[in-house]
Each structure stands twice: as C-alpha cells, then as structure tokens.
Amino acid sequence: MSRTAASAGTTALRRPGGGTTSRPGTGTAPRRGTGLARLLDQNPALRIGQDDYNINVTANYGDQLSTSQVAAAIRDHPGAGRPAHLYFHVPLCAYICHFCNYVKRKVADGPEGEAAPRIWTDLLLDESGRRLAHSPWLAHAPIESVYLGGGTASLLGTEQLKRLLDHVRARYTLADDCEISLEGNPDNFQHDELAEACAIGFNRFSVGVQSLQSEVNAFAGRGHDAEMSLRAVAKLRATGRPFNVDMMFGLPHQSTATVADDIRRLIDLDVPTITIYRLRNADRAKMGIGNRALWNVDSVKNRLREQHLFPSLGETYAMREAVVELLLDGGYHPSPCGWWNRPGVYPDGNIPRVSRNKWQRHDSMIAYGPGAYGWLTGDGDTVVQTHNIADISGYAARLKEGPGLPLASGRRLAGYQAIGMVLGFAFKANQPVDAGRFRRRFGVELFHDEPFAAVFAELVERGLMERVPGTPESIAPTLDGEALHEEIISVYFHQRIGGFAEAVCHR
C-alpha cells in the first residue's frame, strides 16, 4: 500500500506494515516499517500474551500509603491555580460484557433499577462535596477537562447528568474552553439523548461500539447490533461535536478481514476519532483494581481456547496492522497512542484535552466513584496515586455510614519511580517528549544521564522512537512504537527506569 512522500516540514513515519506517512511539524524520513509480526520477533520482551495483557500507564510500584496518608496528601497538595482533570466513575451497566473487568454492576430490573441513576448521582455528589470540604484547593484548580465514564455514564439520564454538571460548574473553577465528555454505548444514543446532553453542556462524546459485526458483539454479551451502532454514529455526527468510537481487536469471532471492514466503514462515515484497543484478558480482580470478567474464569477461558476462539498473538497484531493501514490512508494520525484522529479535530497537536491533561502534561487527576484512581502532581519530584474503594457496595456503605473519604489506598512515587511513570504518560500521549521539562522538574538529563540515555538509545535503535528534527531536546514515538506503546511503557519506562535502584540526580 503506497503513500506519497512526506511534504516539506513533515517527517515520514514508518508504517508498521511498510510505507510511510507524516508527522506534522518535523522534517526527515526514518526507515520503512518492518511489519508487526517481525517487529514482535525482533523485540521478544514486548511479546505479552492475552492473559497477561493488562498494561496501564499508572504505576504498580512505589511506597504504599494508608487511607489516612492518602487523605493527608490530598488535603495538603499545593494544587490551587494549577490545571487539573476531573473524572466521575459511574459503575452502572445495562448489561455486563464478558470481557469487561472494570468496576461496574448491572442495573437491576424494576423500581430498584429505576432509582439507581438518582442514587449514584447522590453518591458521586456526596463524595465530591466531601473532597471539596477536605481539600479547599480543589475549588481553585482550573479544571480544563471533565470526563464522565464507567461503567456506562450515559445511563444516568439527562436529569441526573444535569445535576452533576450543575454541581461541577457551581463548585469548581472550569476553564472557559473546558472539554466535558460523556461516555456511553450505542444503545444509549438511539433517541434524543445526545441533543439533550449537548443542551446541558457536554461538548465531547465517546461511544463503545467495539465491533460492527453483530455476531462478535452478541458473543461478548453486548446489548447492541451493527444497525444500532451506525444509528448512534449518525446521531453523534449530527451534534457537530468531536467524538470517538471505541473499537476492539483480538475478540472471538473476529478476523483480520472483518476488523478491517469495520474500520473502513467508520472511515467512510467521517468519524473524527477512532480508538483501537487490544483485548485484555488479565484478571484485574486479583490485582485489586477491578472486577473479574467472565472470560477470566479458568473454565470459561479454557473452553474458549479449546474451541480456538481467541485469536493468536500473531492474528491479533495482524488485525491491528490492517486497521492502521486503513487509518493512515484515510488521513488519520494517532494522538494519543491508539486514538486515531482526522486532521484538525482538536487544536495544539490534534489531541483531546482529556488526553493532554492526563497524559501529555500529566496534570493532577481528581477521580470520584468506586474503583476510581487519580494522582497528584506538580513541579515537585514526587507523584501520589490515589485509589478509591473498588467494592461497589463497600464504597456506597462508606459514604452512607459516616464521614470521611471513600479511599482505599495510595502510592507515593519518587525519583526514578516518578520519572518512569511520567515518561510512560508522555509516551502514551504520542507527542514530542521534551527533555527540558524533565530537567526542570526532576533535575535529570534524559539523553545523557543513566538509565534514561541507554533506554532512549535502545528505543531509537529499535525504531520505536525517533529524535525530532530541528528540536534536539525532543524525542517522539514512531508508528512501530505507537503499535506497541503499552508494552513499551511497561517494559522500558516502568520496569527499566521506574525500577532503577541507584540514587536519582535531583535539582
């Protein structure tokens, strides 16, 4: 598959399947792509199987903090005047997908289910109010992005969503151009829900389609078919607001051809952002950060394997490679990694504000709801991760039965641990990583001090990152690096840098 040479002022990026495309704002052309199968053979440390694939940009290391220590860190954080991201986790679902291992529960039938949106809105408002009273700086942190996810945040309905947004506007300091996102499934966007959401202040949306093959979605336990998905996409386009469509690869009953056909249809519909995710089948419940999915259960997992329903690692990455070829030819570019945008969807690097706040700039993330995790960051050389109670009933009981915050634990990261985590976020953003930023904050030289220099030299040698021409202080992922971004974050930044034992060079 061919593409014209990069124009002046751009870099030709290596296509994972061969050929080139361009990175805006740079100037030379690195070598051509090798193909993802060969890339995995060349990088055996990045071959991570389906059942072990639960990589996240947050860190699983650092000093454990008790509930009281986390509460104190939140209270004393110097966050006033510093940009932050606000997240609300709604743990409600109309159905439970067989692959989902996030914190959620199915909405009950009858009066209990009808009351659930109001009950959970009350709980989220209660937690937010407690956090504001506990940490007065929160009211004075400019909130540049707000995200309502889950679960299925759109199940709250217009009345309860309006209560949440009214609270956020009244109690927090929102930037004039604050990005406010709502997440839902196609079956939630079949009527007037999106028009009503726009009317109350949402200006960005995310919809979890996962597949346009009805057989795939039915086998995974999802409650929508291809027709509903396409209707939801049409309604999203009618809003005139940016939105992303989440798609998965590596699911049972998928093939390279059917996954490619799904993406081709979305490209033809001018979907502004197409997000692509590999199936993760690690047991998050064992890690204390989620629920057990049906496909995590050994008897179910073994049966699916015996029936050869899970694609192999090679087949899974062949799906991704085919998808990326289509996206590149459609003019899309990943920003952040895995989020493929049409040109001009977003300003300043064509990256959503939520991703710029969370990953590119690593601003503090204030997170509410059961199982929600956030972090506190700034100019200092430490990062504090915060984790809420993951048990849904335990979270609700904690708020109903007494004062205080529904915190479970936390982690304090310092030195190389913090640098590894922040570098992982920066890689995920798929924007140029500025060495000057790390010099100012941590007092280290990324391209001269160890272990950073060796890590970046190896990533460049392996074609997973490239120096940005004309800006000697910057380095950025290649398309091969983007294809394996979560594996790279885990192996190179969390393990090799975050686990480095020698004393870090402070300012």
Image (spheres, helix red, strand yellow):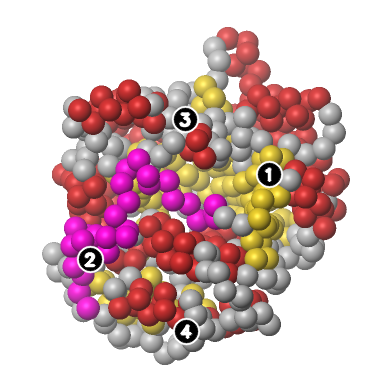
Say whether residue 39 is magenta: yes
Quadrant including the N terminus: bottom left
Report crowding for label 3: few under 14, some 14 to 19, many 20 or more residues within 10 A (C-alpha).
Answer: many
Label disc, if present, on residue 292 of the rendered structure: 3
Q: Where is 303 relative to 469, above or below? A: above
> What distance separates the C-alpha of mark 3 from that of mark 2?
33 Å
Q: Report which residue position mark 1 lands on.
A: 409
| First in residue order: circle 3 vs circle 2 | 2
Q: Report which residue position mark 4 lands on.
A: 447
Please indicate whether residue 145 sits to the left or right of residue 36 in the image: right
Residue stretch rendered in magenta on the structure: 31-60
| Quarter location, residue 120 | top right
| First in residue order: circle 4 vs circle 1 | 1
Across and down, in percent, residue 148 comes to 59, 42
The three-letter code of the residue at mark 4 reads: Phe
| First in residue order: circle 4 vs circle 3 | 3
Please indicate whether residue 85 sits to the left or right of residue 166 in the image: left
Quadrant including the C terminus: bottom right
The three-letter code of the residue at mark 2 reads: Gln
The local secondary structure at tag 4 comes to loop
> What distance separates the C-alpha of mark 1 from that of mark 3?
20 Å
Q: Mark yes or no: residue 76 visible.
A: yes
Report crowding for label 1: few under 14, some 14 to 19, many 20 or more residues within 10 A (C-alpha).
Answer: some
